[in-house]
Amino acid sequence: MRVLIGGGSGFVGRELTRLLRDKGHEVTLISRQPGPGKITWGELESQGLPPCEGAVNLAGENLMNPLRWWNESYKKDLFSSRVDTTKALSRAIAASSSPPHSWVLVSGVACYKPSLTAQYTEDSEWTPFDLLSRLVKDWEAAALLPENVAKTTKQVIIRPGVVLGRDGGAMKQMLLPFWLGLGGTLGSGRQPFPWIHVSDLAGIIVHALEPPADTPPSSSPQVFNGVAPPLNTNYEFTKELGRVLGRPTILPVPGFVMNALLGLERAVVLTQGQKVIPKRTLESGFQYNYPDLTSALKEIVS
Ligand code: NDP
């Protein structure tokens, strides 16, 4: 299968590319920078969709970019880098004379309202309540294909929790302080911490890229929660990371410090959380390589 990956040069994209190539598939990236094995977003718009059987969008300005201050221009980039690239891909798919059989958008669990008690599956109803949930709404809406195209192209939305892996994402910023014994719970530590190992997220994306089983595919997107099955808290994550590293985790970071450092609208990702259940992901038969924190964190720090 030929797979086109928007934003495939990033943390998740590198893992996905490796997995697809290992399985004998061909990968082309869409990037802001030209290069071998890549097309640019400008080329996608001017020349249309290159031949492919699967398309994925992973592009987006990093939510935790340490080099950027939390301000209106950053927030605008968070939206445009996701919504505009997703629109560009869905438009190119709709305009193609031979559209791919699968189109996968990776969004996020920020659509589910943080709560210590509520549990969310892919079937849970939600309406936007803050900046990040509005972002997910606009992002997922941008992926929708016209009805005539949705008859042949399967649409999938994957909502990952915090993606854990050695080569990027949250762990890249967390490992050093934890190694130095400076790690601790964030805020109260009681908040849910939905997470997934990057290799499992890549696996779920590959699973979603498979040709549709039912003909024609459903006209609305299938949603999969991209999280590991256990419902862990930030406290459990912190203690397990400390244990696996053999380091103390006695220095909690108060919520108000997180809010001041990251900005309230963004800090919610770490100081609050959602209990997310991968109901449809499990029902689809997906087998996790790292179904629990211990196995995931051991692989990452090994
Ligand atoms: P990365 O931060 O690694 O970025 C992915 C790619 O997006 C980059 O390699 C870059 O590709 C492209 N990109 C970055 N900034 C912009 C911009 N301003 N405009 C257009 N393209 C841009 O992301 P991840 O791989 O970590 O995540 C992939 C997707 O999954 C993202 O949309 C993210 O929001 C979502 N997600 C990630 C989570 C995580 O914990 N990592 C959690 C939940 C959701 P290039 O330079 O080649 O253009």
Image: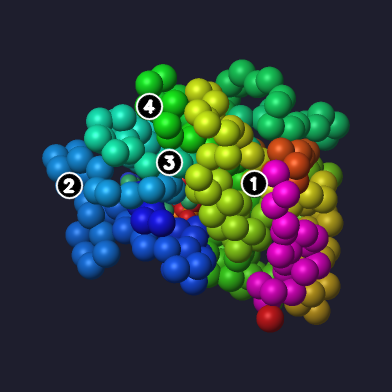
Colour scheme in the image? rainbow
- Indicate which disc, 1 or 4, sits on the residue closer to the N terminus: 4
4 or 2: mark nearer the eye: 4
The answer to whether mark 1 is within 8 Å of ligand 1 is yes
Disc 1 marks a residue whose amino acid type is: Gly
Asked if the residues shown at circle 4 and circle 3 are in contact, with their CB atoms under 8 angstroms apart, the answer is no
Can the viewer see residue 265 in this picture? Answer: no
Locate residue 31, reporting x and y percent: 29, 54
Q: Secondary structure at mark 3?
A: loop
The answer to whether mark 4 is within 8 Å of ligand 1 is no
Q: Secondary structure at mark 4?
A: helix
The residue to which callout 4 is attached is 149
Residue tagged 2: 43
Give, as a three-letter code, the residue at label 4.
Val
N-terminal label among 1 and 3: 3
Q: Quadrant of the image for the C terminus?
A: bottom right
Q: 10 Å neighbourhood of mark 1: few (<14), some, or many (≥20)?
A: many
Is residue 300 located in the magenta-colored stretch of the structure? yes
Q: CA distance from mark 4 to mark 3?
A: 10 Å
- State left or right for residue 54 relative to residue 92: right
Residue 282 vertical placement versus 15 (above, below): above
The CA distance from mark 1 to mark 4 is: 25 Å
Of the numbered discs in the image, which one, if any, rests on residue 226? 1
Q: Closer to the camera: disc 1 or disc 4?
A: 4
Badges 1 and 3: C-beta atoms under 8 Å apart? no
Across the whole image, how many numbered discs are drawn on residues?
4
SS for dot 1: strand
The residues colored magenta run: 284-301
Going 31% across and 30% down the picture, which residue do you hit? 94
CA gap, disc 1 and disc 3: 21 Å
